[in-house]
Amino acid sequence: MKLSTLGRGQSARITSVHHVPASIRHRLTVMGVIPGTGVELVRRAPLGDPLQIRLDSEQLIVRRDVAKLIDVEVL
C-alpha cells in the first residue's frame, strides 16, 4: 500500500522509500521518514495535495506525488 492511499486518521508503518529520488529521499530521511517508522495521515489539503502526516510526535507536509512512492503497511 502507498502512503498516499491512507485514509484520514489511519496508521501504518513505513516499509520502503526506495522508489523516491535520491535527493528527496535524503531530505525525508533527515525528517525521520525511514522504514520501520510509524506514520498517521492527519489530513489532506482541500484538493488532495499536500498531505499532513504524523511521525511519532512530529508532523510533516508531504506532496502527494512523493507520498505515492512511499510504501507502508497498515497496522
Image (cartoon, grey):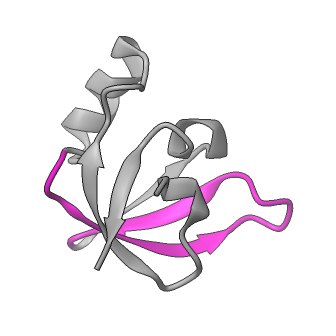
Q: Residue at horizontal 42%, vertical 25%? A: 20
Q: Is residue 16 left or right of residue 48?
A: left
Q: Position of residue 13 (x, y in %)?
A: 25, 64
Q: Position of residue 12 (x, y in %)?
A: 33, 71
Q: Depth check: give the residue in front, 64 or 54.
A: 64
- Determine whether 71 is above or below 22 in the image: below
Dividing the image into 4 quarters, which one contains the C terminus? Answer: bottom left
Q: Determine the residue located farthest toward the bottom in the rendered image.
A: 9
Q: Is residue 9 left or right of residue 32?
A: right
Q: Position of residue 43 (x, y in %)?
A: 61, 74
Q: Determine the residue located farthest toward the top in the rendered image.
A: 22
Q: Position of residue 6 (x, y in %)?
A: 54, 69
Q: How many marks?
A: 0
Is 36 covered by the magenta stretch?
A: yes
Q: Depth check: give the residue in front, 56 or 35.
A: 35
Q: Depth check: give the residue in front, 27 or 69.
A: 69
Q: Residue at horizontal 49%, vertical 53%? A: 2
Q: Residue at horizontal 64%, vertical 37%? A: 65
- Determine whether 17 is above or below 40 in the image: above
Q: Which residues are magenta?
A: 35-56
Occupied quadrant, residue 14: bottom left
Q: Is residue 41 left or right of residue 50?
A: left
- Determine whether 39 is above or below 21 in the image: below
- Determine whether 40 is above or below 19 in the image: below
Q: Determine the residue located farthest toward the right in the rendered image.
A: 47
Q: Residue at horizontal 23%, vertical 73%? A: 57
